[in-house]
Amino acid sequence: MRFRLLVLVGSILLAAVFLAGPTASAQRGGMFQGSADDPAIKYSSGPLNNVVDSLNSRLDSGAARLSFLGRSGYLRSVLEALDVSIDTQMLVFSPTSLQAPFIKESNPRALFFNDRVQVGWVRDRDLLEIAAQDSRQGIVFYTLTQEPTASPRFKRMTACLGCHMTGDTLGIPGLLMFSTTPSSARSFGRSRFTDHRIPVENRFGGWFVTGTRGPAAHKGNAVTVLDGNPSHQLTSTTGLYDAHGYLSSSSDIAGLMVFSHQVHMTNLLIRAGWEARAVDPEFHPNAPRGNDDLIAAMLHGIAGEVVDYLLFIDEAPLGAPIRGRSGFAERFQATGPHGKAGRSLRSLDLDRRLMRYPCSYLIYSPMFDALPPGVKDPIYERMWEVLSGKERGERYQSALTLADRQAIVEILRDTKPDLPAYFTPVVN
C-alpha cells in the first residue's frame, strides 16, 4: 500500500508542476513522501560514503591527525583535512542552527564549504557542526567536540533533522540557506529559503556580506554598527566584532552566491535518488506490480525539476555586477575540470548571471554519479531536449542562447565520462 501511495503522490506532484503553467514550474517543486528507513535507502543504518566518514577512518588508523589551536579549536585543522578553503567563509548572525542562542552580530557563526561538505563554527562553543554530502544517503550530519583530546572523532547526529528534513529540504536530509528579516532591533522575524531563483535584493538577510554588487542592494549587513553606512557595502568585517579566533575577515558575496545555488541543487539530486530507489522493485519484492507507467511519469517529472534548476532556467538576473574580494572566485574557477578549449562549468559570470556556462558543476558530484538509471536516464534525456534546441518553450529560449547550449554540450563531452552518446554537437 505504501508503494502505491508513493507513486500516487509522485504523479499528483507531476501534474501540479506541468499543468499549472510557467509560474508553478519555477517554484520549489515536490517533496519526498516516503520513509527515510525504506529498505532502498536505510538512512539510519545503511553504509556511508562521504568525506567525513572517510576522515574518521583515517583518524582511527593514524593516517590523519587534527590539531587544536586556541579559540578556533579544531576548525583550521578540520578544514585542511576536508580540503575546504578558508576563502569560502560565510558569516551569519541570525540565530539559527543547533547553537542559535550563541550566534549574534558580535559573535557570528562561520560557515565553510566545498562541493561535498559544509563546516559550521561558533566561537567558544563546544561543537563543530559538519554536513557531508553522502553519495546515497543525502546529507549526513556530524559534530566534533571542541576540546583537546588524543583521539578526536566525528560523531553522527540526527537532532539536526528537525530542521534539515522538512519541506524546505524537499523532505530529505538536506541543506538550508535562509534570508532572515529582522522584526525589531532585537529579534528576527520571517525567514525565506534562498536559492538562485530568488532576486538578489531579497537574499542574505542575517548575513555579513563582503564585496560589492554595483549600486544595487541586498538584505545583508543589516547590523546596528553599520547604521551610519547607507549602502551597507563592506570590503571586510574588520571592526564589526572581536575577530579573535576567526580565520578570515571576509564573507564573500561570490561565495554566498555560489552557495545559494548549491543548496537547492544538492537537495534536488538527493530527492531524485531517493524517489528512484523508493520505487525500485528490487528493494520491494512484495510490492504490487502494474504501476510502471505511473512510476516512469513520476521520475520524468522529477527529472524535469532537476534539469530546470541544473540549467539555471529560472535564475533571477543579477541586476548589477558582483565582485568578491577574498579570492574565492579565482580559486573556485581554477578547480575545473576544464574542456579541450580550457572552458569549465565552474567559470563564473557575475555580471548578468552566476555562471558563464549555465550548467551546474554538481553534475560532477558523487551524488549525481550515484543516481539510479531510473532517474539519471530521464535527467540526461531532458537535458538533451533542452540543450539540443528541441525544447522551444519561451522560458528555455530566453534562459539559454544557442552559444550557451553549444558551449555546455562541448564542455560536457570533454569532461563527463558517462555522458550519453546522443549528446552530439549542437547546430541550432
Image (spheres, rainbow, N blue to C red):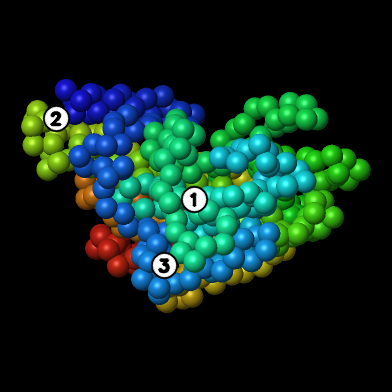
Tell me the number on the disc at residue 255. none
Observer-nearest of 18 and 66: 66
Instruction: Tell me the number on the disc at residue 143.
Output: 1
Against 255, is 77 above or below? below
Q: Residues within 10 Å of mark 3 (few under 14, many from 20)?
A: some
What residue type is disc 3 on?
Leu
Q: Is residue 315 above or below residue 6?
A: below
Amino acid type at mark 1: Thr
Residue 303 appears in the rendering: no
| Residue 59, label in figure | 3
Q: Is residue 374 left or right of residue 308?
A: left
Q: Position of residue 306 (x, y in %)?
A: 38, 44
Residue at which label 2 appears: 291
- Residue 105 visible to the viewer: yes
Residue visible at 74% across and 55% down? 210
> In which quadrant will I find the N terminus?
top left
Return the residue found at the far front.
150
Mark 1–mark 3 Cα distance, whole angstroms, equals 15 Å
Would residue 298 be found to the left or right of residue 56 on screen?
left
